Image (cartoon, rainbow, N blue to C red):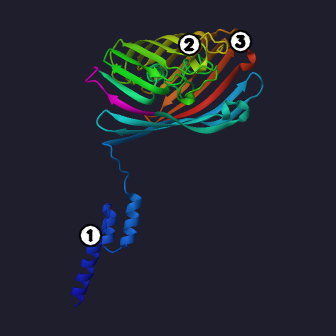
Amino acid sequence: MKRVLASALIFGTFSSALAVDVNDPLIKKLLEKGVITSEEAKELDRKTTNTTSKSKKLKFGGKAYIGYTFTDKNNGSDAGSFEVRRGYFVTKFYFNKKDHIRFTYDVSWQYKKEKESEGKEISLKVKHLYLYKDISKIIPGTAFELGIAHTPWLDYEEHSGWWYRSISKTFYEASDGAHLLPSADAGIDFKTKFNYFSAEYGIFDGEGYDHIGRSDKGNKSNKPMVEGRATWHVLGGGKKKPKPLTQTYANISIHGLNSFNHRGSDKDFSVLQFHAVYNQPLFLAAGQYIKVNWNDPGAKDNDGNGYSFNFEIRPLFNNKFVILGRYDRWNATDPKYDRKMYIYGFAYHVNKYITWIVNGITADYDNDSSSNYTKYMVTAELHY
């Protein structure tokens, strides 16, 4: 009789376990042994079930720039603070091996209402939201991004010539450099890649992803911007982003754009740029020249020409220890904004996830000493 009752109990428990829709094998086993009830099994399984999607593959990643900066200003208002300078969280939703949708959150540490007197705050923006479509069967080696997409220049330079976006933007974008446009905008961006040649070109709104539709320089309606880059990869490697600590590469590029009625002004905004970089595991050397035409009365800072040189020397620990430097020179239409910037420091690449950087930045305005400053920075650059 006892055996019959025990068998019935086991059978009843096992039948209950079969009747409950549970995905996790451990939870299912606990239910079968009577350790947990059906309701408890359902609740645990609901909490532990993996995220599902209609895509063939989901990829997550990102980077963050965290550190401390002390700024010694020439006007006497010195300041120091810990900073979350930038944080990116990237999601890619793949339809097949190449085609996908990309979504990027951009967390930045910036002045409230872009005014220093308002203090700083953490802001959250959408940097990328685009469809990536491979069209190499129609145009060899080509794909496009449609939406809030990359623009042709900055992503290329930040992955070939200037690798330390965590401490300073490139000369093209930095506020004490040429101070031009950001790295993403609403539009369509075509990418063509071959071993010895690559190009990127497209049509965009022209104000940048953080100021889409901006008309702060006049009352004209915004018109599109056309932009393009062409690069000769002298030693090959044009199909993939390089690895500077282990690879040798040499690139020569030309880049140009024209933004019609830029930011609502009466004038078109145009840029012509030449850039070259040579890298081997022991060192990197890069340089560029930029010429800007924007004959608008309110564009005294952005209108002008300038050049920049930067280097890396990697003498120790399998090229992981880096001595770095950069010199920027900008000659503005209004001499008040003529300026130089010096960047100098050390970096150590711990692994593919963490890089530590200790550096200084000095800004030197030729005719406005109140804008001069020196920054001392410690940075953890994180990739995940």
Looking at the image, tell me whether mark 3 or mark 2 is earlier in sequence order: 2
Q: Can residue 343 be seen in this view?
A: no
Kind of residue sitting beneath label 2:
Asp
Kind of residue sitting beneath label 1:
Leu
Q: Does the magenta stretch include residue 135?
A: yes
- In which quadrant of the rendered view does residue 216 lie? top right
Task: Give the label on residue 18, or none.
Answer: 1
Image coordinates of residue 135 in percent, x first then y, are 30, 25
Which residue corresponds to the image point at 41% horizontal and 36% vertical from the top-left?
A: 102
Q: Distance between the residues labelled 3 and 2?
A: 23 Å
Residue range in magenta is 129-140
Which residue occupies the foreground of this view, 289 or 140?
140
Q: What element carries label 1?
A: helix
Q: Nearer the viewer, mark 3 or mark 2?
A: 2
Task: Give the label on residue 268, or none.
Answer: 2
Q: Identify the residue position indicated by label 3 in the image.
A: 336
Which residue occupies the foreground of this view, 342 or 239?
239
- In which quadrant of the rendered view does residue 47 lie? bottom left
